[in-house]
Amino acid sequence: MMLMQIWVPSNPRGAERLPPAIVAAESDFYLRRLWGKPSEDVTIKQKYLVTFTVGYDQKANIDAAVKKFSENFTILLFHYDGRTTEWDEFEWSKRAIHVSARKQAKWWYAKRFLHPDIVALYDYIFIWDEDLGVEHFDGEEYIKLVRKHGLEISQPGLEPNRRLPWQMTKRRDDREVHKFVEIMAPVFSRDAWRCVWHLIQNDLIHGWGLDLAFQKCVEGEAVNGKAPWQGVKDRCKNEWTLFQSRVANAEKAYYKSMGIDPPNSTAR
């Protein structure tokens, strides 16, 4: 009697020889015990994932940031300085996930440790820098805002006293949302992250310009015949041109007030 070979093309690549019922294609970062019943390991299944790329010198800021998130959030720290055990001075650190690889950048970690199938159980994934201002932030309230507006890729408004690559990302009290997301503090829905993860290039670890490509992973209504992301991209370019012009004019005004010709001047 010849046994029939299992071959299921719809299974994930590499698992075609397995019966579909045994395929576990997705995972999570829930911590589990080494004893007892598996069904009793996880008492709280967090719905959201927050990651920070950190050095120990930023411990105070990270401690303040983590406390803005409830127990509904899994905390994952990527350590670029190799220092992990020192963080146990914080009680929350003992429940967090720690990944250490020296001298790497945020998107290097994201590409290697946040595969969409690994984070598939989380509704939203926060991929944040270590030095954000969080004085006015609340994790649960932010999730409510994201759901209210149906935001697939978002970020909180940044504190105006922090470094802001784009002024349009500054926190404002007169509106709930803005239309630009930059690289420091993005938040992705599960579906958007599945797209963005594939967009991240394996060898381009700093992520410069990645925020200008996020729009490729979301759908939106056209504005004046243009996709929303195109309007944002156009404004970014216009703001950069305007900023350069202002710097040049300010320098010219300074040299004029000093009664000297500016560098590279053709005046005689």
Image (cartoon, rainbow, N blue to C red):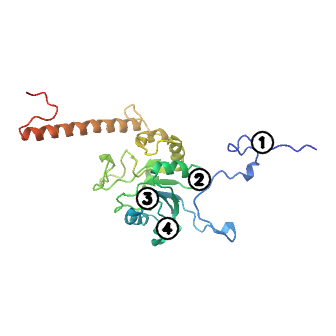
Callout 1, which amino acid?
Trp
Residue 34 x %, y %? 66, 69
Q: Nearer the viewer, mark 3 or mark 1?
A: 3
* Residue on which disc 3 sits: 54
> 21 and 86: which one is in front?
86
Q: CA distance from mark 3 to mark 2?
A: 21 Å
> 251 and 264: which one is in front?
264
Q: Looking at the image, which residue sits at the far left?
A: 259
Residue 208 x %, y %? 40, 42
Callout 3, which amino acid?
Val
Q: Nearer the viewer, mark 2 or mark 4?
A: 4
Disc marking residue 7: 1
Q: How many marks?
A: 4
* Residue on which disc 4 sits: 85
* Residue on which disc 2 sits: 118
Q: CA distance from mark 2 to mark 4?
A: 24 Å
